[in-house]
Structures are given as C-alpha cells and as structure tokens.
Image: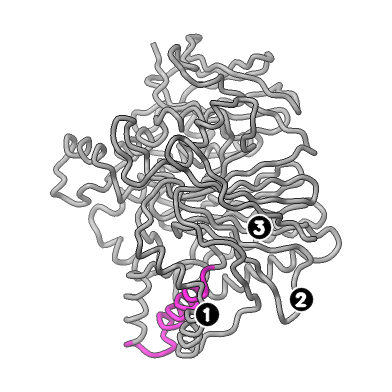
C-alpha cells in the first residue's frame, strides 16, 4: 500500500481552484477530497526513485473554507489518525477580500522536540502552534518563503550522521549534500517537522531560492563560477539542487493554467521515469540561465506579487554585470507596468534592494574595483573582498539597482498608480524597514518601502548585530562616501532612510492589505510558543 512520505503542501489557491503537493512511497493515484464535495486527483510521477504528485483541486467556492483529506489509491493517509492538529483546510478567497501576506527567509530545520534548539524557537513552528490553538483566528492567506528553505552547505548533526552512513565524509563535499537523494533528506528534515508539516498543509505558500538552497554566495561573480566549475563535485551538486528545487518548490508556485502549458511538467508525467528529462533541463539551466524562468507572478485580488529570481538569472560578465538577464528584465517590466491592475505591488526578491548605507556603498565600490576602474591590482582585491564579505546584493550590480529604482518610480506613478510598492526580502539575518525617495524629482506617487525579514530560524551572531547597527549610522555613511569616491561610483537616483529596526531574532513579517490601505506587523518567536509583536505600522500614504 502506498504511504505518504512528505506533505501534503497546499501551494496555490484562488477562488475556485488549488494545488496540493505530495510525495508518496510508491507509484499511485493521489486524491484530495474536500468536505464541500470539491477535489481532484493525479497520478504520481517519478524522479530519481521518488514519487510525487501535484493534485489539482477544482470546484471550490469563493469566500468559503473547506477541510480536506488526502487518499492514495483510495486509502486515507491524511490527516494521520493520531494528529493533534485541527483539520487542514483550503480557503478560497474572494477578489475583494482583505489579504494577509506573511513572509521571511533563512530557516534551518528545527531539531527534534527532545533536543535543545541552539538558535531559539522557530518562527514557523510558533506560528503553527498559535494557529492550531485558535483555528478560527487570524492566519496568513499566503506565506512567502524568500530563500534558504534548505541549507545544502550547512547540514545538521542528524543529517551528517545520515550522510556518514552513506559515504565517507572525508571526501568532498564532506558534510555538505552531494546529490539528489541527499537533497531529499534536507526536505524531509525540514518539512516533516510536525508543526511545519501541518502549517504547510493549511496555508498556501510561494517560494523562491537563495544561495544556500545550492551553496553560499551562489553566482557571486564570473570568477566564482569558473572556480566552482573546476571543482569535481560541483556539477552534480548544482544539477541536483536545481532538480530538487523544481520538484519541491518551483512546481507549486505555478497556477493550474501555467502547469497545463508547462512542457517539462507534461514530459515528466508522461514518462515512466522523468529523471533524465529533468536532469537535461537542469543542465540547460546551468549552461544558459536565460533558457529558464524561475520568476513568477501571483495576483491576490488587487494585490500583485512578482517573485523575482535574483540568483540564477544573473549576467556575471564584469562589463555587462546585471542581476537579471535581458529576457528576465523584459518579463519583470511586463508584470509591473500594468496601470490600474493592482492597488499594491509586492516585489519579492531574496536579496534586499535597499541595504544599510555602508553595506550598499561597499558593494558599489567593490563592483567598480572588480570592473577594473582602479586597475588590475584593485580588481583582484575587489574580487577577494566581494567573496569574503558577501558583497553580491542589488548594490553590487549598480546598473540593476538603478534600473529597479527607475522601474519602481514608473510603476508607482500616474493614473492608476498603486498605493504602495513594497520590496520584500530576507537573506541578511535581521529585519528592518527603509523608505525610498527620489529627491531629484520624478518620484512615484506610491509609497515605496524595502521590507526585510530574516531569519525565520537561524543563528544571528553578535558580530552581525554590531555590523548592521553600525551600517545604518551617520559615521557609516561618511565612511561609505569615501568608498564611493575612491571607486568613482556614479550617483544613484534614489535615497532611503531606515524607518524601523534593525530587529534581531527568529521572526516573521505580516502585511495586511485591504483596499488601498496597508499595515505591517513584525513578530518574533519567544519561548513557550509565543509570537510577540515588536512593531506595527501603517504603510499606505496618508
């Protein structure tokens, strides 16, 4: 009999349909049966000996909530008979409903319940406990997981013991994951956590990768890529990372209509084993990143989310360095420049657009050095600095930083302009709010804010706290200007100021949008299963 190995994950949900992702122990037909009579089924497909299904659920009624069960070949497998959680539900929103969007990034898997947690309570676990205690209470309509859903390069002691039973950890890549099977171990460790498993079964999720989903500083520079491609274990690691991301995260980001026209999805479902087809896809993505689009768009009533791939779509040639390749830039413009289509624009990018000023200036300076603006010796220093200090955010791609500023100004201006343009990011292991302005004129009518929230569950060393606090200071701005002068860096059209934070801890932000109004709440996980509110603010213009 088929068993449920992982999931269910409720991924997409709109007013009439949804998708539910599962992994099973053998080939079977997965079925979702909703209490209101809606539902759907799908046969599993096979990748590297694992069996998956993304079940399309149809017949939902907008404005209703229905519980659901999962059956494999007709046998009930979810909820488990000993579940201590309320039934998993699918909420079908109405177009004019209030929209609550929770977001954060950077989650180490929580240790087993009988082991101490070295980095403190997990914000996702804590959210699940609050929701389970009050099933009719407040919950996000969607969770945005903005990168580092798994850590391929920083494995837990339990995973290292599992790896050691499989191969010699004295051989590269040591305690890091090496192949697809080892990636599946990371997802089991993270998503079989009881609280997180239930949470992901009942709240839709949108996901995008960041570097640790593959390796720290993934695609920092052309020289970095060249070095990694000369590393014997790298190709298998990268292909396995992209393959496992496509299966576990990317598929669920797509709507049923997008899935219906996706040639790779069709191919792997038609084949007895889709491993070779998916591996060929990952190989093309490695050789020609422009051949694949990981970015996507979701609309929640009058709220538009554009989730941007700021890792794999990079152009790394120093003379044409760009966060996005030309095709990706065109796609982003098409999604954003749609006057009157939305009241709030959310741009999800794992890496913050607006950083503490000293960090921004250091990254712009390093980019100028690496480009050779101060000669070969400084270029070598700039590359060493870029890698050593992780200087590879939007600021390290100066033309892309300015291009995004100009696109946001255009999208937020004129007839039909949205109330807010909000850039949602993680990565930097603290949270803050920064407001953008265009002092030279030509700024948008919308209020533009950088909202950064991380980690969900990870370490925040004291050095990070000190560095980022200093990075926002007046003294840091003076130091940053010296970097910019030395690098002969061009001025940028946008200015920004920190209006909240920095906050440190395991945390989540929640946006609540109704009509043209928007509010923000930041909550931190505390011992005892408590999410404590540390900031609440109104974001929409007065």
Helix, strand or loop status at disc 3: strand
Residue at 59%, 55% (x, y): give it.
Answer: 424
Q: Which residue is mark 2?
A: 442
**Element marked by disc 1:** helix
Contact? badges 2 and 3 (CB < 8 Å): no
Q: Is residue 372 magenta?
A: yes
| Observer able to see residue 189 | yes
Range drawn in magenta: 355-377
Q: Hey, which quadrant is residue 374 in on the image?
A: bottom left
Can you tell which of label 3 and label 1 is closer to the viewer?
Answer: 1
Cα separation, mark 2 vs mark 3, equals 18 Å
First along the sequence among labels 3 and 1:
3
Q: Position of residue 153 (x, y in %)?
A: 30, 51
Q: Are marks 2 and 1 in contact (CB under 8 Å)?
A: no
Q: Residue 474's mark?
A: 1
Circle 3 residues within 10 Å: few <14, some 14–19, many ≥20: many
Q: Residue at the spot x=68%, y=24% of the render?
A: 65
Q: Nearer the viewer, residue 309 or 434?
A: 434
The residue that disc 3 covers is: 422
Q: Residues within 10 Å of mark 1 (few under 14, many from 20)?
A: few
Name the spot of residue 450 as percent of width and height, x first. 61, 62
Q: Earlier in the sequence, mark 2 or mark 3?
A: 3
């Amino acid at each position: 009999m088929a068993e449920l190995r992982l999931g269910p994950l409720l991924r997409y949900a709109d007013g009439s349909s949804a998708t539910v992702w599962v992994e099973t122990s053998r080939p079977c037909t997965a079925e979702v049966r909703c209490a209101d009579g809606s539902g759907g089924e799908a046969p599993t497909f096979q990748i590297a000996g694992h069996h998956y299904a993304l079940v399309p659920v149809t017949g939902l009624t907008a404005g209703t909530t229905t519980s659901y069960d999962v059956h494999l070949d007709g046998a009930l497998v979810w909820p488990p008979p000993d579940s201590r959680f309320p039934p998993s539900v699918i909420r079908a929103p109405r177009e004019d409903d209030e929209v609550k969007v929770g977001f954060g990034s950077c989650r180490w898997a929580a240790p087993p319940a009988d082991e101490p947690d070295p980095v403190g309570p997990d914000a996702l676990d804590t959210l699940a406990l609050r929701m389970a205690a009050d099933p009719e209470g407040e919950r996000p309509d969607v969770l945005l997981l903005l990168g580092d859903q798994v850590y391929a390069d920083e494995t837990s002691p339990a995973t290292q013991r599992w790896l050691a039973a499989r191969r010699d950890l004295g051989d590269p890549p040591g305690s890091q994951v090496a192949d697809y099977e080892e990636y599946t171990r990371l997802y089991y460790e993270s998503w079989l956590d009881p609280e997180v498993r239930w949470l992901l079964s009942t709240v839709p999720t949108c996901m995008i990768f960041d570097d640790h989903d593959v390796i720290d500083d993934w695609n920092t520079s052309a020289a970095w890529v060249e070095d990694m491609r000369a590393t014997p274990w790298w190709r298998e690691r990268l292909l396995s990372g992209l393959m496992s991301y496509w299966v576990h995260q990317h598929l669920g980001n797509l709507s049923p209509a997008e899935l219906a026209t996706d040639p790779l999805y069709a191919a792997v479902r038609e084949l007895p084993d889709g491993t070779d087809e998916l591996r060929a896809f990952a190989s093309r993505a490695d050789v020609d990143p422009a051949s694949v689009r990981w970015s996507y768009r979701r609309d929640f009533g009058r709220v538009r989310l554009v989730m941007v791939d700021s890792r794999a779509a990079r152009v790394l040639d120093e003379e044409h360095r760009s966060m996005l390749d030309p095709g990706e830039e065109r796609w982003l413009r098409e999604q954003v420049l749609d006057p009157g289509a939305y009241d709030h624009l959310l741009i999800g990018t794992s890496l913050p657009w607006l950083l503490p000023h000293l960090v921004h200036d250091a990254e712009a300076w390093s980019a100028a050095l690496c480009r050779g603006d101060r000669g070969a010796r400084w270029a070598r220093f700039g590359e060493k600095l870029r890698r050593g200090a992780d200087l590879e955010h939007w600021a390290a791609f100066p033309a892309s930083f300015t291009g995004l500023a100009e696109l946001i100004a255009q999208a937020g201006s004129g007839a039909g302009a949205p109330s807010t343009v909000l850039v949602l990011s993680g990565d930097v292991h603290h949270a803050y709010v920064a407001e953008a302005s265009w002092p030279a004129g030509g700024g948008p009518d919308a209020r533009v804010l950088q909202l950064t929230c991380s980690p969900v569950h990870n370490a925040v060393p004291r050095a990070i706290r000190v560095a980022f606090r200093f990075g926002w200071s007046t003294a840091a701005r003076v130091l940053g200007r010296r970097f910019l002068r030395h690098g002969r860096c061009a001025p940028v059209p946008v200015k920004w100021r920190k209006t909240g934070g920095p906050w440190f801890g395991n945390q989540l932000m929640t946006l609540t949008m109704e009509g043209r109004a928007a509010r923000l709440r930041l909550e931190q996980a505390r011992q005892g299963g408590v999410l404590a509110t540390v900031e609440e603010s109104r974001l929409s213009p007065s």
